[in-house]
């Protein structure tokens, strides 16, 4: 097996009797690997030839393993060095949030050019902002300045046709069912071109959600 740059770095750190990769929480990672395989300390001891007391001290960060100990771990557990050096994964907890918006029950925000209906508006601190928009504007001249906001935006035409004006591109015709994804800090504006006012669905990311 060809040594990677990560392995070479680890070998340099392990020179002499200095503690091996102490900042990498190796003990926590070892315990994670052991539990994932449903091994007891005795199982790992038999596989590696290391005493249970030594393994317990490593897992509890009471000692820092030398390179020879790490070699016994990787050989006995049949894993490579990068696997052992990978930072342990943190458990993720979900809050299980949800916010139902019934048809026509979104939060309305009318403007001279758009009529926005915010969806999922009761949910705070969300990373995406979904809304349905009736496009009232019929000419680009109705906009006094570009619309722009931080983040990114996905837009789909639900009804009618629109002309999408953007700061760096030629105007683009979008028909019912068409969609587009763009950086929303780029100036943009929508104009209805169908007989009825077009309706679009947009999902914006928050600028601070990256």
Image (cartoon, rainbow, N blue to C red):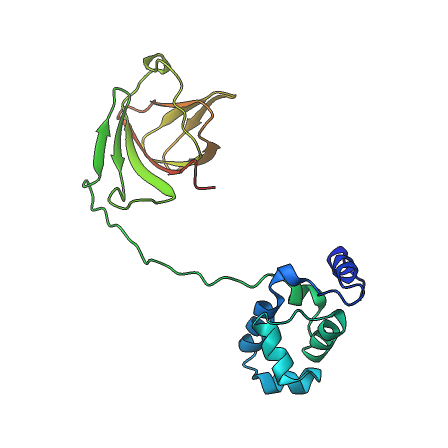
Occupied quadrant, residue 81: bottom right
Query: Which residue sits at x=43%, y=38%?
Result: 208
Going by the image, does 85 lie left or right of 154? Answer: right
Q: Nearer the viewer, residue 184 or 114?
A: 184
Going by the image, does 13 lie left or right of 61? Answer: right
Count up the numbered dots.
0
- Where does the N terminus fall, quadrant-wise? bottom right
Outermost residue to the left = 105
Classify 194 as above or below 119.
above
Q: Position of residue 86 (x, y in %)?
A: 63, 62
Query: Which residue sits at x=55%, y=71%?
Result: 32
Query: Which residue sits at x=34%, y=15%?
Result: 143
Going by the image, does 23 lie left or right of 144? Answer: right
Q: Nearer the viewer, residue 170 or 44?
A: 44
Q: Position of residue 192 (x, y in %)?
A: 33, 23
Q: Position of residue 20 (x, y in %)?
A: 71, 65
Q: Position of residue 118 (x, y in %)?
A: 27, 37
Classify 135 as above or below 122.
above
Classify 21 as above or below 42.
above
Query: Which residue sits at x=32%, y=14%?
Result: 142
Occupied quadrant, residue 138: top left
Occupied quadrant, residue 201: top left
């Amino acid at each position: 097996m060809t040594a990677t740059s990560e392995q070479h770095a680890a070998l340099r750190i392990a020179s002499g009797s200095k503690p091996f990769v102490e900042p990498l929480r190796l003990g926590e990672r070892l315990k994670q690997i052991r539990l994932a395989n449903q091994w007891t300390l005795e199982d790992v001891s038999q596989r590696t030839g290391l005493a249970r007391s030594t393994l317990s001290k490593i897992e509890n960060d009471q000692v820092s393993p030398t390179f020879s100990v790490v070699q016994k771990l990787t050989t006995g557990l049949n894993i490579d060095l990068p696997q052992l050096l990978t930072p342990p994964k943190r458990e993720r907890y979900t809050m299980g949030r949800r916010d139902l918006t019934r048809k026509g029950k979104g939060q309305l925000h009318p403007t001279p050019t758009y009529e926005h209906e915010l969806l999922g508006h009761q949910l705070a601190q969300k990373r995406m902002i979904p809304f349905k928009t009736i496009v009232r504007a019929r000419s680009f001249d109705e906009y006094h300045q570009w619309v722009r906001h931080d983040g990114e935006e996905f837009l789909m035409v639900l009804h009618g046709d629109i002309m999408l004006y953007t700061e760096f591109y030629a105007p683009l015709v979008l028909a019912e069912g068409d969609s587009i994804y763009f950086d929303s800090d780029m100036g943009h504006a929508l104009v209805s071109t169908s007989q009825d006012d077009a309706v679009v669905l947009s999902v914006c990311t928050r600028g601070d959600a990256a």
